[in-house]
Image (cartoon, rainbow, N blue to C red):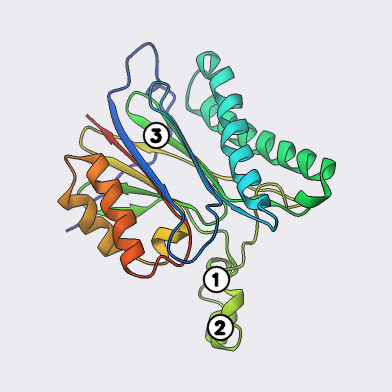
Amino acid sequence: MSYTKHMKETEDNFRGTEVLHLEAAYRTDRGRRRENNEDSVLVDAEKGIFLLADGMGGHQAGEVASSLAVQEAHFYIKDRLDRVQGDTEMIRLLREAIFYAHFRIKERARSDPDLAGMGTTLVIAVFGNDTVYIGHVGDSRAYLVYEGMRQITRDHTVKSYFTGHAFMARRHLYPQRTHILTQAVGTSEELAPEMHSLSFDPGDILLLCSDGLTDMLTDEEIAAIIRENSGKMEKAAEALVEEANDKGGRDNISVILVRKL
């Protein structure tokens, strides 16, 4: 089945004073093999702000990094959201929020030697009247589910960066390197968040997830579970985490599902 969603390029589809009609659900789980859950999620359905982060670092530093990322980015966006006008300003706000979280994590790491080197992925979605704005760093993903399912974000990993290049022909020589992040919030010297804005219509579903889900399930398996439970976001989120654990649960698993009513 063919399907198309148009990227937004106009300034006339913004929030205004309209109430956002969204149904949201989330789950975060330690998985089967990890001692701690270093993922963090933050859901603000009233404001239409959704954040997910997957932390990294020893001595529970990953938990600190991911928690700081979602809290600080949410604070930055929520504090300024009502003053934003138009698509361009919203994209700028998300970018600034990611950099704000980046600097707050680096600041915290400098003040505590046990947290040195901590970092995190971060994916953010903010909803307008008929638009969703997405910003991300790392390999936590955003998908749009409607007639089909499409990955919106591009993983910031060595594998993604070199896909189609000579590296991929020799990846069997060092498979452990293919999932290394090329940038992360809190650690990268030069941060380059990727931003997206696209149509979000009644019945559409947005999925934000950590790699604990996508490393265990294929896109086709994820889409099938969401379709089977498309009328019940809570059940869909639960089923995704359960299936990822059944397939091995090698990492922490976090999902956020948002459907437009």
Residue 140 percent location from the top left of the image: 49, 53
Q: Where residue 211 is drawn, which disc sits there? A: none
The spot of residue 244 in percent (x, y) is: 34, 62
Q: Is residue 169 left or right of residue 96?
A: left
Q: Residues within 10 Å of mark 3 (few under 14, many from 20)?
A: many
Whole-Å distance between the Cαs marked 1 and 3? 27 Å
Q: Position of residue 39 (x, y in %)?
A: 52, 49
- Pointer 2 residue: 171
- Residue at 54%, 87% in the rendered image: 172
Residue 73 falls left or right of residue 131: right
The amino acid beneath tag 2 is: Arg
**Is 209 placed above or below 45 here?**
below
Determine which of the numbered discs, if any, sits on residue 159 in the image.
1
Amino acid of disc 1: Lys
- Rounded to the nearest angstrom, the CA distance separating label 3 from label 2 is 35 Å
Image vertical order of residue 216 relative to residue 123, above or below: below
Residue positioned 40% across, 21% down in the render: 14
Q: Nearer the viewer, residue 34 or 128?
A: 34
Q: Earlier in the sequence, mark 2 or mark 1?
A: 1
Identity, as a three-letter code, of the amino acid under mark 3: Val
Residue at image coords 32%, 16% = 19
Residue closest to the far front: 35
For mark 2, does the 10 Å Cα neighbourhood hold few (<14), some (14 to 19), or many (20 or more) residues?
some
